[in-house]
Image (tube, helix red, strand yellow):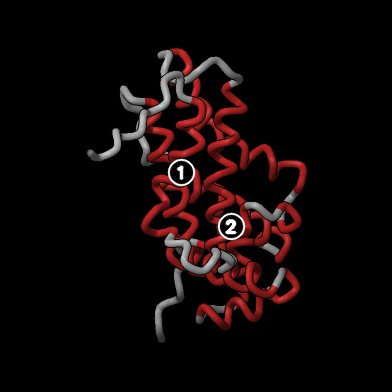
Amino acid sequence: MPPPKVHNEALRSALLTRAAELVSTQGPDALSLRRLAKDVGTSTTAVYSLFGSKAALLDELYREAVHRFAAALATVEPTADPLADVIRMGVVYREYALSDPHLYEIMFNRSWSDPSTAGEELLQTFRPLLDAVQRGLESGLLRPAPAESIALSCWATVHGLVTLELNGIVPPGAAVGDHHLAILTAPLDGWRAHPPQPPPPRP
């Protein structure tokens, strides 16, 4: 007799990954626990054991998306250069979104999660960026302005860029991969107390 399947973290991760693919590409109606179990090669009993119900699975899917996103941003540790930290967060943000597009999409679609907690949980991932901007203001590297406005402009830029990339609507000839660092840096440069000067023209 074969040993019973263990409902472990690896199975949970596989189920969430497949559920994210189904929901983000076909909508929540395409997700059934029976189909999910079949796609992953497990039993519906295992799915019920881990999540309880489809509604609970969708809530867990949202929380997992936020958790993975927050974990990625947490790899950017604060340094003595807060503006460099902001830019690095933008790079990590884009890298995460492109590597895990299904969960990334779910994270920003509150119709698939409990609206009473979705916004609050997601906004927690905004805190590291806000803290870095605040350090930039305190050190005089940024011109006086509300930290929330500066951080939001940086967030909006990277989020907009990622949205264009994931939806395949980047204009023809726009080499985002080659120039994404300059794109992410541009809004922050606009807030600098002493914006970087362009190099002098060649004689």
For residue 72, say whether it is visible. no
The amino acid marked with disc number 1 is Leu
* Residue plotted at (63% across, 61% down): 51
Pick the quarter of the image with the C terminus. top left
In the drawing, what numbered circle is on residue 16? Answer: none
For residue 202, say whether it is visible. yes
* Residue plotted at (55% across, 81% down): 39
- Quadrant in the picture for residue 126: top right
Q: Earlier in the sequence, mark 2 or mark 1?
A: 2
Question: What residue is pinned by disc 1?
Answer: 184
* Residue plotted at (75% across, 73% down): 29
Pick the quarter of the image with the N terminus. bottom left
In the drawing, what numbered circle is on residue 163? Answer: 2
- Quadrant in the picture for residue 195: top left
Residue 144 image point, x, y percent: 54, 15
* Residue plotted at (37% across, 28% down): 196
The amino acid marked with disc number 2 is Thr
Please state which of residues 161 and 65 is positioned toward the viewer in this rendering: 161
Residue 84 image point, x, y percent: 36, 32
Residue 193 image point, x, y percent: 45, 19
Furthest residue to the left?
A: 203
